[in-house]
Image (tube, coloured by chain):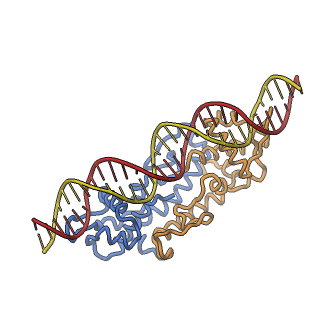
Chain colours: A blue, B orange, C yellow, D red
Amino acid sequence: MLSRKTKYALKALSHLARRKTNDPVQISVISESENISQKFLESILLSLKKAGYLGSKKGKGGGYYLLEKSRTTPIASFYRSLEGPIAMVPCVSLNFYEKCEDCNDEDECDVHNLMIQVRDKTLSILENTTLEEFVANQTS
Amino acid sequence: MLSRKTKYALKALSHLARRKTNDPVQISVISESENISQKFLESILLSLKKAGYLGSKKGKGGGYYLLEKSRTTPIASFYRSLEGPIAMVPCVSLNFYEKCEDCNDEDECDVHNLMIQVRDKTLSILENTTLEEFVANQTS
DNA sequence: TAATTATCCTATCGACTTACTAGAGTTTAC
DNA sequence: GTAAACTCTAGTAAGTCGATAGGATAATTA
């Protein structure tokens, strides 16, 4: 399940990406337009900035803006930076791999083998959809 | 992420399904063979029984056994009964649908539309893999 | 019937996570 | 220099997770 944090982040990114220009947008504007608690969104946008996806400008006329490269960043990257592993089990995670303590031989673990398939299918979407495409997506 | 509960459940089901016969198997046997805390496994197997996937026999020579129909049950069913929704967002869940409070028009929500795709890909595996196939699965 | 075996059930626990909120600090534009 | 806006640190209520403890219940065996 997607946490609210990640969901809100994707909605905020979508909001910024739908704009033609990369001007700063105030938190309050995004928060009202997307129906997200402003204070909560504040911390989310800050995370996205620290992760290198957004820029910010303080003071009057300030706000958060999309860094140009973020438009071609796959959703998988945003997901991982907010939510962590995409895989359903750490032992099939590409970026957050961890061995199971209870499992001697991964190749013989049915759960492992099934979850690899799920991971691959999921990644085929999340890795191949950029923010740009995410926004352009009409009932795909 | 798969909870340990669900992971252990799948491993236990796999253990039972790998057997040719459907004789009762003691919790302690499964627990040792799969490296799962016995007490925790106890409650998991009980859930699976209540959900109608396993039978049980008390007393000497007792244990849990696979109900025949469970062999042809898709993994998705086990998953849902233990973990709940498979979808990443309630608003795209087939069996646990819930409307987002923050979203006016689902069809125009980018998150919604993307998560439909992820759901379909995931279901294409979990709905089309029966316990039998799950076990037969060799590095597929 | 008594003893043994194994499931069934309740309830408790500490650690962690989630979704937020409060409030003060800092930078910028005018 | 003051108002506008982001930055940052804390904290918190509620819930979940993984596990444990301890006994109740039921079935089998002798």
* Left or right relative to A93: residue A55: left
Of residue B97 and residue D21, the one placed in the foreground of this image is D21
Q: Is residue B68 above or below residue A32?
A: above
Q: Quadrant of residue C6?
A: top right
Of residue A82 and residue A26, the one placed in the foreground of this image is A26
Note whether residue B121 is visible: yes
* Left or right relative to B16: residue A126: left
* Left or right relative to A104: residue A131: left
Question: Percent position (x, y) of residue B97?
Answer: 58, 66
Residue lying at 28% horizontally and 68% vertically, measured from the top left:
A65
Question: Percent position (x, y) of residue D2?
Answer: 14, 67
How many marks do you count on the picture? 0
Q: Is residue B99 above or below residue A99?
A: below
Q: Is residue B88 above or below residue D18?
A: below
Q: Is residue C22 above or below residue B32?
A: below
Q: Quadrant of residue A22?
A: bottom left
Residue lying at 46% horizontally and 62% vertically, measured from the top left:
A126
